[in-house]
Image (tube, helix red, strand yellow):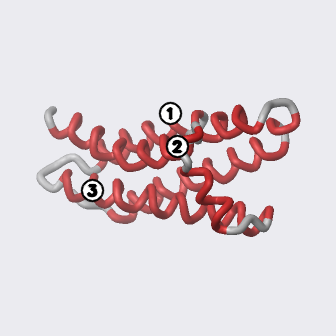
Amino acid sequence: MIRPGLTLTLWVAIALLVVLNDAVGDTWIATSLSVRAVEWYKVLVPLPYVVLMAIIHARRTAGPRWFEAALLAALLWPTSTVLVDFLYVRLTYGQDPEAFLDRFGFWWGAPYPLLVLTLFAAPLLAGTAFARR
């Protein structure tokens, strides 16, 4: 069953955690770690939470139209979370879009694409796992 309200509510929880985690990483954690370690911190901390939200979403949307619900979450969560994260760094630090897009530079070891990929894949994988039951 497709539940857009549930998908939106879980996304708000994910976006809030990502922004708060970025704020903690940029203020408290950044004083004691290197820039690369802070970037990894800002990606690795939300990953279990994203998986948990995907599991909750899959359990609540199990049924004959589970794939549509999982696809809705898989398309909404990464794009809107990246947008909220961009707005956070733009409004807080005044970063230009080029500096934000540099976070996607996986060729130099940027971990941010891992978070975006998890936001995309977690609802689909969790939906698949619960659809088989």
Q: Kindly identify the residue that appears in the image at 35 percent across and 60 percent down.
A: 75
Dot 2 falls on a residue whose secondary structure is helix
Q: Which residue is mark 2?
A: 106
- The image's mark for residue 65 is none
Q: Kindly identify the residue that appears in the image at 30 percent across and 39 percent down.
A: 126
Precedes in sequence: disc 2 or disc 3: 3
Q: Which residue is mark 3?
A: 71
Instruction: Tell whether 97 sits left or right of 81.
Output: right
> Which amino acid type is marked by label 3?
Leu
The 10 Å Cα crowd at callout 2, few under 14, some 14 to 19, many 20 or more, is few
Dot 1 falls on a residue whose secondary structure is helix
- The image's mark for residue 48 is 1
Report the quarter where the C terminus lies.
Answer: top left
Residue 77 percent coordinates (x, y): 43, 57
Instruction: Tell whether 115 sits left or right of 121.
Output: right
Residue 60 percent coordinates (x, y): 30, 48
Report the quarter where the N terminus lies.
Answer: bottom left
Dot 3 falls on a residue whose secondary structure is helix
Residue 30 percent coordinates (x, y): 82, 39
Report the number of discs.
3
Q: Nearer the viewer, mark 2 or mark 3?
A: 2
Residue, far front? 107
